[in-house]
Image (cartoon, rainbow, N blue to C red):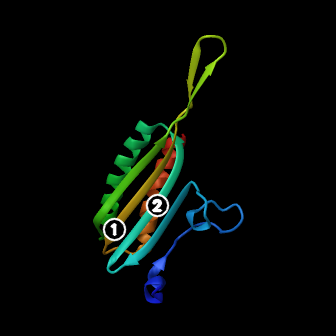
Amino acid sequence: MNTENHEEHHHHHHHPHGDGCGCEVCGEKEKLSVTVHLQDAAVVVSAHYHVTADRQELSALLTVNMESTAAKIDAVGGFIGHFKASMEVQTVEVFSLTDREVHRKKGNGSEIKVTVAAILFAIKETDAERLIRTMLEDIDKKVRK
């Protein structure tokens, strides 16, 4: 591995690693993780967010918050080369039969994994990390109220 490139690679986590840690660096998942590294002149941000929520509500919040985050990136002098998010949705339905009639029951929301990828230019790594993290934290606050 080229140590020069490795020195430019930074992971920004806001928790101690070790027993019980749920981040991808430690081999498990946590609710929210954001990593940032430099690639040539670009700041590359990757984020993962896990939540149980209504898919449509989360989709609407993600749309609005991505647009406002793009405006904030612009406001600090940065520009976007790439800014995408995906939602992986898992729902659970239970089917039970006690006599001859099947009863269906759905859970109160879906398990959702949101993955964000951004390639940004003319912005500090710390600003890029803060803006993407804040975007997902704001979504989390709204989903959980």
- Crowd rating for badge 1 (residues with CA inside 10 Å; few <14, some 14–19, many 20+): many
Q: Is residue 72 above or below residue 50?
A: below
Q: Which mark is residue 119?
A: 1
Image position, residue 26 (x, y; %) = 62, 66
Say which residue appears at 54% left-offset and 57% top-offset.
32
Occupied quadrant, residue 120: bottom left
Tell me: 37 left or right of 101: left
At a point 56% along the width and 68% down the height, the residue shown is: 13
User: Residue pushed farthest front?
Assistant: 100
- CA gap, disc 1 and disc 2: 12 Å
Q: Residues within 10 Å of mark 2 (few under 14, many from 20)?
A: some
Question: Label 2 sits on what residue type?
Answer: Ala
- Up the image or down, 21 lies above or below 54; here it is below
Q: Secondary structure at mark 2?
A: strand
| Residue at the far right in the pictured view | 19
Nearer the observer, 106 or 17: 106
Q: Residue at x 43, y 42 (%)?
A: 58
The C terminus lies in quadrant: top right
What residue is disc 2 on?
47
Amino acid type, label 1 = Ile
Where in the figure is residue 126, as x and y percent of width and height? 45, 72
Q: Residue 19 appears at what percent x and percent y?
A: 72, 64
